[in-house]
Amino acid sequence: MNEPGLASTATLIRRVHRGESAAREQLVERCLPLLRRWAHGRLPAYGRDLSETDDLVQVTLMRALGTLDTFEPERPGAFLAYLRQALLNTLRNELRRNRRRPATQPLVETDGAGAPLAQEERDFATELDLYDRGLASLPERQRQAVILRVEFGMTFPEIAEEMEMPSADAARMSVSRSLVELARVLS
């Protein structure tokens, strides 16, 4: 179907359920870079320097792997969607926690009132909220296609495998149509 040796996340989870430790390692090797890329692209500029971002990604993945024995993928891409939401929740909590901590040094030059940072936070939150609402309005398969390509940076062969599509071209067309629909919803 696609690249040889590329197993879908659902296939790896089924193998983990059968007790294959190599499948668990493959799942980590597959998900960790995707989550790191997603986390760094999702954080606003004022949060990208958090030294613990990689730690948060690893903790989120390890927690998810801890629940893997009871996780049943209901649809293609379900585990990645679960990881995305878990990491989003973790990052939001960490950003809230960092806002409450007193800064040891200013993050940006301000007039003393902190206005530029506050505006950047509001702008980022507004854009993120708009994108998330647009994404949520898409049908599940379209939402998955956008998330896998845009947020996780997966290739079309990887998306085809993950979403159990017949080919990379089918994945490309699905992503293209989904992005057109997302653009329509956002405009």
Image: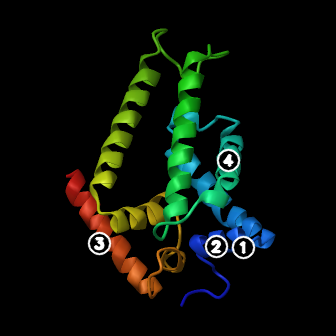
Horizontal side, residue 186 vs residue 57: left or right: left
For disc 4, the marked residue is 63
- Check whether the beta carbons of the residues at disc 2 and disc 1 lie within 8 A of each other: yes
Q: Position of residue 142 (x, y in %)?
A: 34, 66
Q: Amino acid at mark 3?
A: Arg
Q: Mark 1 vs mark 4: which is more N-terminal?
A: 1
Front residue of this view, candidates 44 and 132: 132
Residue 115 percent location from the top left of the image = 42, 17
Nearest-to-viewer mark from 3 and 2: 2
| 181 to the left or right of 165 | left
Name the residue that disc number 1 marks: 18
Question: What x and y, as percent, mark residue 173?
Answer: 35, 79
Q: Residue beneath label 2, please? A: 14
Q: Which mark is on residue 177?
A: 3
Label annotation for residue 173: none
Instruction: State which tag comes first along the sequence, 3 or 2.
Output: 2
* Kind of element beneath mark 3: helix
* Mark 3 or mark 1: whose residue is earlier in sequence: 1
